[in-house]
Image (cartoon, rainbow, N blue to C red):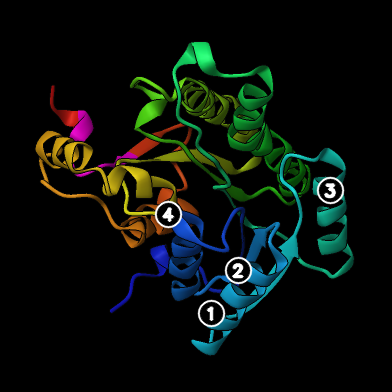
């Protein structure tokens, strides 16, 4: 028998960057748990295709195309949801990008692009969601961090800085919003089989390093984030706040 603790029936989840990759997998998992999902992205065609595929499975899906790094676009998107009577109960801040090069080769524009997409967007979308959750006295915010929220590797300094910021932004959200019935937590994926990591998965040396360094001896699948996402989105986590759950095959547990 399914536990009502993990049911998302009657709830609406907005997942940013959900036309593909980790975001799409998480949106699918939340929909399977009963949530109505609002997909987000900036590529209208890709977003429409993702929505059609989820609707074909019988899921309740809405689409909001907006740039999570643009304050006016974020505010306007929530105003459209307000006008349509759509209350976001669950927010998953997933949108992100990656650029790889040595620190000394990064331009200031590249630095800002990574920080704005991976960190500032979580502040902007989280702020607008919380402005509506606080009066209702309930809500779930799930920020997608990374192993890089706690550890560093060469050539990904802006990403590491952003994901480290996600960890502390999550704690700040919990510190301010917990008294209003809002839980803010994060998921820290390990090395996952996504388009963003294609350059790494196709590199035999790096592939071997990941498999050798990870106790599970393999890369993670995007759908393996769904369990943690459903837990953090559901009533089962009502007294869990300000935490980051690493879904990494055990990598962060070993030296």
Assess disc 2: are there few (<14), some (14-19) or many (≥20) residues with their C-alpha within 10 Å of its C-alpha: many
Left of 27 or right of it: where is 128?
A: right
The image position of residue 135, as x and y in percent, is 78, 46
Nearer the observer, disc 2 or disc 1?
1
Q: Residue at x 53, y 79 (%)?
A: 54
Assess disc 1: are there few (<14), some (14-19) or many (≥20) residues with their C-alpha within 10 Å of its C-alpha: some
- Asked if the residue under mark 1 is in contact with the one under mark 2, i.e. CB atoms within 8 Å, the reply is yes
- Asked if the residue under mark 3 is in contact with the one under mark 1, i.e. CB atoms within 8 Å, the reply is no
Region rendered in magenta = 246-252
Quarter location, residue 155: top left
The numbered mark, 3 or 2, whose residue comes first in the sequence reads: 2
The image position of residue 158, as x and y in percent, is 52, 23
Q: Residue 46 versus residue 2: which sits nearer the camera? A: 46
Q: Is residue 175 magenta?
A: no
The numbered mark, 1 or 4, whose residue comes first in the sequence reads: 1
Inter-mark Cα distance, 2 to 4: 22 Å
Regarding mark 1 in the picture, which secondary structure is present there?
A: helix
Nearer the observer, disc 3 or disc 4?
4
The residue pinned by badge 1 equals 54
Q: Residue 73 versus residue 167: which sits nearer the camera? A: 73
Q: Residue at x 22, y 30 (%)?
A: 252
Regarding mark 3 in the picture, which secondary structure is present there?
A: helix
Inter-mark Cα distance, 2 to 1: 10 Å
- Asked if the residue under mark 4 is in contact with the one under mark 2, i.e. CB atoms within 8 Å, the reply is no
């Amino acid at each position: 028998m399914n536990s009502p603790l993990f049911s998302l029936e009657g709830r609406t989840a907005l997942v940013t960057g959900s036309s593909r990759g980790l975001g799409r997998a998480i949106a699918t998992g939340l929909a399977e748990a009963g949530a109505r999902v609002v997909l987000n992205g900036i590529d209208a065609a890709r977003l429409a295709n993702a929505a059609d595929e989820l609707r074909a499975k019988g899921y309740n899906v809405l689409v909001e195309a907006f740039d999570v790094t643009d304050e006016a676009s974020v505010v306007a998107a929530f105003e459209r949801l307000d006008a349509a009577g759509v209350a976001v109960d669950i927010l998953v801040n997933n949108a992100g990008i990656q650029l790889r090069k040595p620190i000394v080769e990064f331009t200031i524009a590249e630095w800002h692009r990574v920080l704005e997409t991976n960190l500032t967007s979580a502040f902007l979308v989280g702020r607008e969601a919380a402005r509506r959750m606080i009066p209702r006295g309930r809500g779930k915010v799930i920020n997608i961090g990374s192993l890089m929220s706690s550890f560093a590797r060469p050539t990904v300094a802006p990403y590491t800085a952003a994901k480290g910021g996600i960890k502390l932004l999550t704690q700040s959200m919990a510190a301010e919003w917990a008294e209003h019935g809002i839980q803010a937590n994060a998921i820290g994926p390990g090395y996952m089989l996504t388009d963003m990591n294609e350059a790494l998965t196709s590199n035999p040396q790096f592939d071997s390093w990941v498999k050798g360094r990870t106790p599970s001896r393999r890369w993670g699948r995007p759908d393996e984030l769904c369990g943690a996402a459903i837990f953090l989105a559901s009533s089962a986590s009502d007294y869990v706040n300000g935490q980051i759950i690493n879904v990494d095959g055990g990598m962060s547990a070993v030296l």
